[in-house]
Amino acid sequence: MDHVQSLHHDDVSRVKQLISLTKPGIIFGNVVTLCGGYFLEADGLFSWLSFLSVLFGMAFVIACGCVLNNYIDRDIDKLMSRTQKRPSACGLISLKFALSYAFILGVLGFLFLYIGTNLLTMLVAAIGLFTYVVAYTLWFKRSSTFGTIVGAISGAVPPVIGYTAVVNQFNEVAVVLFLILFCWQMPHFFAIAIYRKGDYKAANIPVLPLKRSMRYTKMNMMVFIVLYVAATLALSAVANTHLLYLASALIMGLVWLILGVQGFYTEDTVKWARKVFIYSIINITILSIMMMV
């Protein structure tokens, strides 16, 4: 009986490891913004086939990128407290397994996109995956403060994919959706870099708070918050958004601007950065929901 329970426990543990390698939190966050882009123009064009295809397709593609990211970053993950317990950091994942697992996830993802969406959507997804794995993980993340910018490019792809899955064109709406998520990610990532500064220093990752002053980092955060607010409001000028969206974007944008300004006067920068991080998630989640209205 004990042997059976032990086997069951090992199986559950392996399943948890497989799931954790795909970074479910990142997948969920990207799916939320994807839905925002999809339902923005889905009125009269909604199709369960295209919706479920882009939903599962993008989830699998993101999972593929996250598995590769986990394996590539296994050396630096060992050095950071928040990542040192990942299966890859603990040496439990081989190169052969990581590549096989990522390949299967990637094939499933692009198969879903091929069946239910269009070639443009597949192309945008492929660009996002390449940017995340090759440009960000393999290159810029370890070598330059511009890694944050490169990472933000791949992170801005999901709402664009949701949108192109419906309309099959890359127009001004797609550009604004990209800019919204791109500008949102910069203060979001900078906030993480501030309150996780010790981890990034231990792993020798060149994030802005380590390479430049804290004030310079906060100034950059403010610039991108302003650009983010401008982009969220611009969406109402190019897309068929509801008045609730515009009101929400304006109010939440003003709150974030006020929170950003407070950073220049606070004595506890770490606590402030955590507030910015949490608020950024609340902000983009509500904004995505308002896009769906």
Image (cartoon, rainbow, N blue to C red):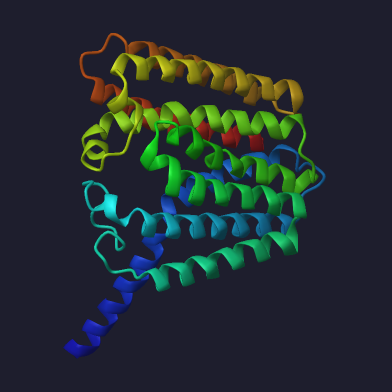
* Rendered image quadrant of residue 15: bottom left
In the rendered structure, the answer to whether residue 111 lies left or right of residue 10 reads: right
Camera-side residue of 202 and 117? 202
Q: Is residue 38 visible?
A: no
Question: Residue at coordinates 75% horizontally, 25% vertically from top-left?
Answer: 238
* Rendered image quadrant of residue 24: bottom left
Question: Residue at coordinates 33% horizontally, 73% vertically from top-left?
Answer: 14
Q: Residue furthest right?
A: 44
Q: Residue furthest top?
A: 265
Q: Residue furthest left?
A: 2
- In the rendered view, would you say 99 is above or below 267? below
Q: How many marks?
A: 0
In the rendered structure, the answer to whether residue 153 lies left or right of residue 81 reads: right
Question: Residue at coordinates 57% horizontally, 17% vertically from top-left?
Answer: 250
- In the rendered view, would you say 124 is above or below 196? below
In the rendered structure, the answer to whether residue 133 lies left or right of residue 50 reads: left
- In the rendered view, would you say 180 is above or below 84? above
Camera-side residue of 87 and 73? 73
Q: In the rendered view of the protein, which quadrant contains the N terminus?
A: bottom left
Q: Is residue 93 visible?
A: yes
Question: Residue at coordinates 50% horizontally, 29% vertically from top-left?
Answer: 184
In the rendered structure, the answer to whether residue 103 lies left or right of residue 241 reads: left
Camera-side residue of 293 and 182? 182
Residue 29 horizontal/vertical position (percent): 49, 44
Residue 237 horizontal/vertical position (percent): 74, 20
Residue 281 horizontal/vertical position (percent): 44, 34
Q: In the rendered view of the protein, which quadrant contains the C terminus?
A: top right
